[in-house]
Amino acid sequence: MTCSPSRKALLLWRILLLLYLGAVAWVCFSKPDSLPSVPQWDFIIPFDKVVHFCLFLPFPIVAFFSLNVKKKPMLAVLAFLLIGLVLAGCTELIQGFTEYRSKDVMDFVADGAGLTASSVLLALYLLFSGKSRTRSY
């Protein structure tokens, strides 16, 4: 039995979501010495905040396409933003209970910035991808 292209794409998005969530768990909960380090970082924003931003950036997009949302897509984008914020908050709270990590509100801010940026991009994509680019006179 073969899958249609849309079923294959949906399966791919769902596998990507599982891999993504696993990667988030690994980065957020593994011991810091098991993660790569950056010896020199001369930038205004600390490196770990950039990592947090990038780590949560994909969530709304991957979650949206893994569920194949058809009805009320903008509401779904908002829901995935909120779910992502809850996920980010939970990771920070759990890190506070470990001996080798600490919770940091600025990590949550960076997570939220990544989630917000991708939610805005996803909403713009949804707004403009469904409309025809040609005018009819």
Image: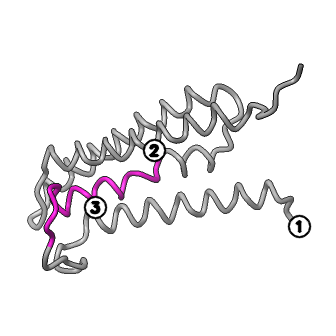
Q: Is residue 115 above or below residue 40?
A: above
Q: Which one is closest to the eye, mark 3 or mark 1? A: 3
Along the viewing direction, whichever of 117 and 98 lies nearer the viewer = 117
Magenta range = 41-59
Q: Which one is closest to the eye, mark 2 or mark 1? A: 2
Secondary structure found at label 2: helix
Q: Pointer 2: residues within 10 angstroms few (<14), some, or many (20+)?
A: many
Q: Name the residue beneath numbered marker 2.
A: 118
Secondary structure found at label 1: loop
Secondary structure found at label 3: helix
Residue at mark 3 to residue at mark 1: CA–CA distance: 39 Å
Q: Name the residue beneath numbered marker 1.
A: 2
Question: Going by the image, does 136 lie left or right of 111?
Answer: right
Residue at mark 3 to residue at mark 2: CA–CA distance: 15 Å
Q: What residue type is labelled 1?
A: Thr
Q: Which amino acid does label 3 sit on?
A: Val
Q: Is residue 25 above or below residue 109?
A: below
Residue at 79% x, 32% y is: 132
Point out the residue furthest to the top here.
Answer: 137
128 within the magenta span: no
Sequence order check: which comes first, mark 3 or mark 1? Answer: 1
Image coordinates of residue 118 in percent, x first then y, are: 45, 44
Image coordinates of residue 110 in percent, x first then y, are: 25, 47
